[in-house]
Image (cartoon, grey):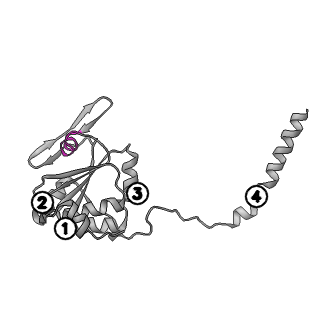
Amino acid sequence: MRKTIVIFAIAVGLWAFTPHISQSEKQTDNRKIPEIQANTPQNKADKIKWYSIEEASALSKQNPRKIIIDVYTDWCGWCKKMDAHTFSNPTIASYINENYYAVKLDAEQKASIEFQGETFNFIEQGRKGYHELAAALLNGRLSFPTIVFLNEKMEVITPLPGYQKPETLDPVLKYLIEGYDKGISWEDFSKNHYQSSF
């Protein structure tokens, strides 16, 4: 009996100190709470224009640019974080749009892809599988996310595995445009030429 009284007293005490809203207050308060998203507000110029690999390849033939490929999977948490925090960063998005053709490549997509005169297919493996183009671009090291950079001849410059923060991706993006083709070493570029956007 004593335990029941103690439990009842605790429950009444908790109820007494919990804020309550009357039914009339609930009905008259029609304000909506705005959704909060990473890096808001953004306009369309701050978003990366994503292409398929076929589209980017065709565009690069008309107007040569390097290609940045985000190799991801639907189940990859770090891929989603990079989309939300790095690729949605207005500074990063603007630089990519001005200097690269950006491609999103699902490493587990089922559709075949024509690239550089070859057809790349989905390979079943266990319950899932992988896409041959992703494996080719990543040299068989399927790690997600990985950013792959291609030169204007559609040759792999380098894969960049793992999650990249905006401030760590920024110097790489700039080096490949402002230093790589001029023969400037990464060390020299980092020390003497790079100006951070962050």
Q: Which residue appears at 12% of the width and 59% of the height?
A: 152
- Give the image location of residue 78, x and y in percent: 39, 48
Circles 4 and 1: CB distance less than 8 Å?
no
The local crowd at label 1, few if under 14, some if 14 to 19, many if 20 or more residues have their Cα within 10 Å, is some
**The N terminus lies in quadrant:** top right
Residue linked to disc 2: 152
In the image, residue 17 lies at what x, y percent? 79, 55
Q: Are marks 1 and 2 in contact (CB under 8 Å)?
A: no
**Disc 1 versus disc 3: distance between alpha carbons?**
26 Å
Distance, label 4 to label 2, CA atoms, is 63 Å
Is the residue 28 above or below the residue 57 in the image? Answer: below
What is the three-letter code of the residue carrying label 3?
A: Ala
Dot 1 corresponds to which residue?
178
Q: Earlier in the sequence, mark 3 or mark 4?
A: 4
To which residue does mark 4 refer? 19
Identified by mark 4, the residue type is Pro
Write down the residue under mark 3.
84
* Residue lying farthest to the top in this orientation: 126
Stretch of the chain drawn in magenta: 131-140
Tell me which corner region of the image, top left, top right, bottom left or bottom right, holds residue 128. top left
| Residue kind at label 2, given as amino acid type | Glu
